[in-house]
Image: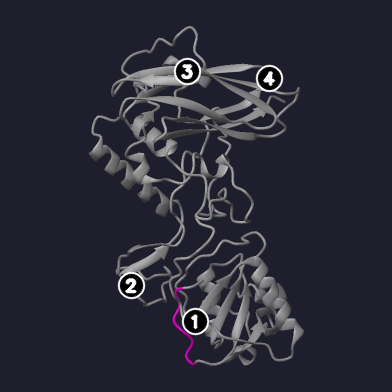
Amino acid sequence: MSLSKPMPEFRLYPLISAAQAKATNASVTDALLCKLGTLDPRKVEGKIVACLRGETARVDKGLACLQAGAAGMILCNDYADRNSLSADVHYLPATQVAYEDGVEIFDYIKSTDKPVAFLTDPGADRRTRPAPLMASFSSVGPNTITPEILKPDITAPGVNVIAAYSEAANPTMVESDKRRSPYMIMSGTSMSCPHVSGVVGLLKTLHPDWSPAAIRSAIMTSARTRDNSFHPMEDSSHFEATPFEYGAGHIQPNRAMDPGLVYDLTFSDYLNFLCDIGYNQTLFKQFQNGAYACPESTNLYDLNYPSIAVPKLSGPLTLTRTVKNVGRPGTYVARVRQPSTVSISVEPMTLKFEKIGEERSFQVTLKAKAVGEPRGYAFGSLTWSDGHHYVRSPIVVAAAT
């Protein structure tokens, strides 16, 4: 994967490991990482260099190869980055490969006296499977401040996103780079966040009476947890991902427009939540005019959030949620996917709505099937459906230790 220019000629080029091309004054480790000044031009000239990812910027490795006279570069992921690939704007023809592919390339170089390679021209591949895939750099839960609230809430496109780019800056942010481009491909939360923000803006335009909590609920409960192969979403190592990685799932804007039901919150609900986590009157006065009288009895687990997180289950726990109808009249039936170690029940199992804005409350009871279970976190879900809408909430639960 790369955004580099094509190879100058359509032919096989000599291939060399960066470790084999080390300069006299460089260590094998630094050379393998293709750090600037560690490659010997006499060994690299006109060849494709296989570099190992890590420690230095990916584009800097390409610059090191270019300065040594290389014809191209293959950037091989280290084990830590495994399958995480980035479309970088390299200085020379280059590509990036996953960890296992890199291992095969280095093994091939060792297996023959005259290894060769060729880098095909960059191109778009719209048949990527599986997708979406959780990035290795994506933040993960559990919530370290308030584990009773599942984080993250949602995941959205944030890897190799193409968008307009200021030509006042070069593509690598390296002073010596004189290239300019009206478009750039970037990755990170800084790419994912605008997707969600845009969806929020569209939903607010479509439903101007919806609160921020209702909009969040619509986005979360309509998200998907399966990829384009209809299998559970995976992480960058191709293990099955969990709500601690994708939250409620991957955002689906069209479904969020008509979620059926939403979990709404008021300003008082947030104040009660702060009461539950120990805020005092001095703290309240920083953002609230005057004091706030905390209720005598509240339950942190009853915060009307579109997900359920129980970090310390020590006995049967019952929590309450309230849903508001924002769609057509209908009857919703609960469906629970419960972990093998936890029993989850819902009462009532059926909710009937006759008009928009109507609210109904229900209770969810969680109970471990054995003492000390679940060991670590277990995952499940609760889905309310009228046959047309599927209002899904992730559930994460762990036993008290």
Q: Are marks 1 and 3 in contact (CB under 8 Å)?
A: no
Comparing labels 1 and 3, the label whose residue is closer to the camera: 3
Would you call the spot at circle 3 few (<14 residues within 10 Å), some (14-19), or many (20 or more)?
Answer: some
Q: Residue tagged by mark 1?
A: 93
Residue plotted at (69% across, 23% down)? 368
Rounded to the nearest angstrom, the CA distance separating label 3 from label 2 is 54 Å
Labels 4 and 1: the sequence-earlier one: 1
Q: Is residue 335 left or right of residue 160?
A: right
Question: Is residue 280 depicted above or below 11 in this figure?
Answer: above
Q: Is residue 264 visible?
A: yes
Q: Residue furthest front?
A: 387
Residue plotted at (66% across, 27% down)? 342
Q: Residue tagged by mark 3?
A: 362
Please state the horizontal and vertical placement of residue 168, each as a whole percent of the image.
Answer: 30, 68
Q: Is residue 375 left or right of residue 298?
A: right
Q: Are marks 4 and 2 in contact (CB under 8 Å)?
A: no
Labels 2 and 1: the sequence-earlier one: 1
The residue under label 1 is which amino acid type? Pro
Q: Which mark is residue 60?
A: none
Residue plotted at (56% across, 80% down)? 73
Q: Is residue 24 magenta?
A: no
Rounded to the nearest angstrom, the CA distance separating label 1 from label 3 is 59 Å
Magenta segment main secondary structure = loop
Labels 1 and 3: the sequence-earlier one: 1
- Looking at the rendering, the stretch of residues picked out in magenta corresponds to 3-9
Q: Which mark is residue 181?
A: 2
For numbered disc 2, what is the local secondary structure? loop
Q: Which mark is residue 314?
A: 4
